[in-house]
């Protein structure tokens, strides 16, 4: 189609990051047979993972002392990052 912008990078046929499939932590947890918390822990410091704020959870203090609030995030993990995370766990990464 004339005039239609391409999503293909200038250096090859690899799609740009925004065009890549993004997984939720729960989806990867189900695929990999681990907990959602484990996937979230693995992905938290990985580059290119989108952290979308979804709220704040305040814990109830049993002893009456104020507690820190936990900021909640929804993680959107690109397929290339998921692949890198899995290879790192299998020991295939340098």
Image (tube, rainbow, N blue to C red):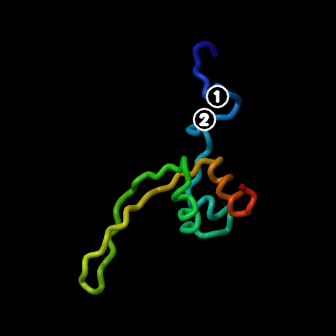
Q: Which mark is residue 69?
A: none
Q: Which of 19 and 67 is in front in this view?
A: 67
Q: Residue at x 72, y 56 (%)?
A: 93
Q: Residue at x 54, y 68 (%)?
A: 37
Helix, strand or loop for disc 2: loop
Q: Residues within 10 Å of mark 2 (few under 14, many from 20)?
A: few
Q: Which mark is residue 8?
A: 1
Residue 5 in picture, x, y percent from top left: 58, 21
Q: Which mark is residue 16?
A: 2
Outermost residue to the right: 92
Q: Marks 1 and 2: in contact by CB < 8 Å?
A: yes
**Would you identify the image quadrant in which residue 19 lies?**
top right
Residue 23 in picture, x, y percent from top left: 59, 52
Q: Distance between the residues labelled 2 and 1?
A: 6 Å
Mark 2 or 1, nearer chain start: 1
- The N terminus lies in quadrant: top right
Picture mark count: 2
Residue 77 in picture, x, y percent from top left: 57, 51
- The C terminus lies in quadrant: bottom right
């Amino acid at each position: 189609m004339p005039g239609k912008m391409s999503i293909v990078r200038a250096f090859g046929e690899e799609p740009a990051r925004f065009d890549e499939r993004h997984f939720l932590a729960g989806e990867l947890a189900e695929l990999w047979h681990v907990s959602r918390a484990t996937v979230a822990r693995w992905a938290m410091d990985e580059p290119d993972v989108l952290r979308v704020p979804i709220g704040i959870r305040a814990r109830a203090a049993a002893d009456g002392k104020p507690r820190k609030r936990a900021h909640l995030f929804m993680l959107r993990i690109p397929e290339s990052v998921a692949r890198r995370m899995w290879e790192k766990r299998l020991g295939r990464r340098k």
